[in-house]
Image: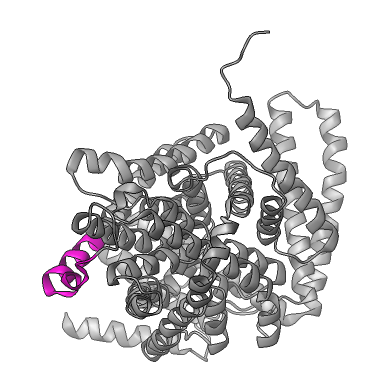
């Protein structure tokens, strides 16, 4: 028998991981509402306690370089950039200012609570405080939690993961430089000198900003290629190259070429946001969009499955038991550090930014700040060259795994009760039925489009095409009737869908105006005026007011008024009741005329 050049034992271990995952999936499908990722973690714990060993090294490099990019890219690509921008102020304040303040708070308290030197306590805080929304967002989707709450939780996590890695790297480098031979990392006070604070601040700015630049440049390059391409399999490959490429360029090649370090996490998030929003809107056909997002959803699911089973299997149970006192102290301190920044900073943001973040959302953001893949990847990266003693590395590893296990199991399993108790689970039966009908309607449309393509290419005979499409056309008509009836019977649902659709249409309007300016079809000042008007209409919609009506136009356009003034008779007279938006535009016009 020829010996293949494949590690059969490793392949068997990987297969074992997915056998466990399949068993968990069947179990979860049978019992109903139970977070899949948490069930995977518990199954991994059970396998570890039962003595089932999986000889796969869940290393820092495996998590950070292989498993993390697809999770980050998929999370960013499925994030609505419009909603992210709308909630950008609370997200950026919590993800950057909040994370830094919570790291400082936990570090200062931790040096006394754990008996660590200050730098080591800060290092632990930088490792454990970045949040992982995977489990809680899956539960949000299942329970029908408000979309804005999901955007706040996911947006903060996407950004604070990158900031946390930057803080960790800066602190570890300082510990390694000041205590290269092991020990407990002295020299902490220098970090809080003016020079030390400026050095760390510049390091964070360069690392995060450089990573964002790499991600945007890489994402735009792939976007331009995809915009002139209509081959969904090739475009899937391009997005895979992009996700891993910008991560590797930022984490490795920039440092080799320029001697500075950029954040691969931030780069991948920036690239994902660009491709998932502008790329999906302007560079992907419906078929490509479906293929790309299905591929990334499947890839993220597989990666999450592997990570959570492996976290459970490789959790150092004996180390957890030996360091239970440290873990018992760390858990409430981590929660307190999270609460210490969420409530005050959100209160401050609410005073200056609209829409405000409700207190109920803040409770969920504190309790839903789960800690998993990033903290574990960072603690697994503490090798012998870190300047920490083996005993201290073992203690830190046990603490991180212990806090992560608590957050995933206890906080994750009680999240549904918290949401129900606060009364913020909003998806009603009629909304669930609407989603079902719309989802099936989209599938039918895609089937009809695919059948037409197959007929045009000669792969589907004309007679078969007629039989095939007749059934789908009947189903499409039934779906349209059912959706129309549902919206008639539930005016609030109809209003919500009207506003949601209007937001998307107005965003398309803005993109079309920007393209017209860029292509020289209209001048910059006219384009600016039109964009200003579209932004005003978007403000209307965000306030819950529609700019369209069934019988008459609900918003008088700038062009209509100018055309009437020019004497064109084809333009209808305006409605007698003109809204605040039109009056605001008049004031702007008069101001411009006076300046002229």
**Considering depth in this image, is 63 or 177 the residue closer to the camera?**
177
Which residue is drawn at the image coordinates 35% and 80% (left, top)?
Answer: 112
Residue 196 part of the magenta segment? yes
Q: Which residues are magenta?
A: 186-206
Which residue lies at the image location 39% right of the left edge and 69% below the top edge? 125
Considering every residue shown, the one lying at the far left of the view is 195
- Residue 567 makes an appearance in the image: no
For the residue pair 38 and 265, the one nearer the viewer reads as 38
Q: In the rendered view, does 56 fall on the left or right side of 566? A: right
Query: Is residue 291 placed above or below 321 in the rendered structure?
Result: above
130 shown above or below 290: below
- With 527 as the anchor, is 505 left or right in this view? right
> Which image quarter is the C terminus in?
bottom left
Q: Quadrant of residue 121?
A: bottom left
Indicate the quadrant containing the N terminus: top left, top right, bottom left or bottom right. Answer: top right
Q: Give the colouring mode of the picture.
A: one colour
Relative placement, left or right, of 302 versus 246 is right
The image shows residue 217 at horizontal and vertical percentages of 31, 47
The image position of residue 469, as x and y in percent, is 82, 41
Q: Residue at x 59, y 44 (%)?
A: 299
Dominant secondary structure, magenta: helix
300 w.r.t. 205: above or below = above
* 326 part of magenta stretch: no
């Amino acid at each position: 028998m020829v010996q293949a050049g494949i590690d059969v034992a490793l392949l068997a271990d990987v297969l074992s991981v997915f056998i466990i995952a399949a068993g968990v999936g069947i179990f979860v499908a049978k019992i109903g509402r139970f977070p899949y990722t948490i069930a995977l973690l518990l199954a991994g714990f059970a396998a570890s306690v039962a003595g089932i060993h999986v000889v796969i090294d869940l290393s820092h490099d495996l998590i950070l370089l292989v498993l993390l990019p697809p999770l980050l890219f998929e999370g960013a690509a499925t994030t609505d950039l419009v909603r992210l921008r709308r909630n950008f102020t609370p997200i950026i304040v919590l993800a950057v200012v909040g994370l830094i303040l919570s790291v400082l708070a936990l570090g200062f308290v931790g040096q006394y609570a754990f008996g660590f030197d200050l730098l080591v306590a800060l290092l632990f805080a930088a490792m454990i405080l970045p949040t992982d929304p995977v489990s809680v967002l899956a539960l949000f989707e299942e329970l029908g939690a408000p979309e804005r709450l999901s955007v706040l939780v996911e947006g903060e996590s996407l950004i604070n993961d990158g900031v946390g890695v930057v803080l960790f790297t800066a602190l570890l480098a300082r510990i390694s430089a000041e205590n290269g031979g092991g020990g407990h990392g002295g020299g902490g006070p220098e970090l809080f000198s003016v020079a030390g604070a400026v050095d760390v601040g510049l390091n964070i700015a360069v690392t995060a900003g450089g990573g964002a630049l790499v991600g945007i440049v890489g994402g735009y390059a792939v976007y331009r290629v995809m915009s002139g391409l209509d081959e969904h399999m090739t475009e899937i490959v391009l997005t895979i190259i992009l996700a891993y490429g910008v991560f590797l360029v930022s984490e490795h090649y920039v440092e080799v070429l320029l001697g500075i370090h950029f954040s691969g996490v931030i780069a991948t998030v920036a690239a994902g946001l660009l491709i998932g929003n502008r790329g999906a809107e302007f560079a992907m056909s419906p078929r490509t969009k479906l293929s790309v997002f299905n591929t990334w959803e499947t890839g993220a699911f597989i990666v999450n499955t592997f990570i959570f089973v492996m976290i459970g299997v490789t959790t150092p149970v004996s180390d957890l038991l030996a360091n239970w006192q440290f873990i018992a102290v760390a858990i409430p301190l981590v929660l307190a550090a999270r609460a210490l920044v969420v409530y005050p900073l959100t209160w401050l943001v609410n005073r200056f930014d609209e829409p405000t973040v409700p207190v109920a959302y803040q409770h969920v953001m504190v309790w839903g700040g789960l800690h998993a893949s990033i903290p574990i990847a960072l603690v697994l990266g503490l090798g012998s060259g870190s300047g920490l003693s083996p005993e201290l590395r073992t203690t830190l590893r046990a603490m991180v795994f212990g806090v992560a296990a608590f957050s995933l199991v206890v906080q994750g399993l009680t999240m549904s009760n918290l949401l129900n108790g606060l009364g913020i689970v909003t998806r009603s039966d009629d909304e669930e039925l609407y989603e079902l009908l719309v989802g099936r309607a989209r599938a039918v449309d895609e089937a009809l489009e695919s059948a037409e393509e197959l007929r045009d290419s000669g792969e589907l005979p004309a007679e078969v095409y007629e039989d095939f499409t007749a059934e789908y056309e009947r189903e499409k008509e039934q779906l349209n009737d059912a959706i129309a009836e549902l919206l008639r019977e539930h005016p609030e649902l109809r209003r919500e869908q009207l506003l949601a659709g209007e937001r998307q249409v107005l965003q398309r309007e803005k993109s079309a105006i920007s393209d017209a300016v860029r292509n020289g079809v209209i001048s910059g000042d006219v384009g600016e005026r039109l964009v200003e008007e579209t932004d005003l209409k978007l403000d209307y919609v965000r306030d819950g007011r529609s700019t369209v009506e069934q019988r008459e136009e609900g918003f008088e356009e700038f062009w209509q008024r100018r055309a009437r003034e020019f004497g064109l008779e084809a333009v209808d007279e305006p409605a007698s009741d003109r809204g605040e938006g039109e009056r605001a535009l008049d004031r702007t016009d008069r101001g411009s005329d006076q300046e002229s």
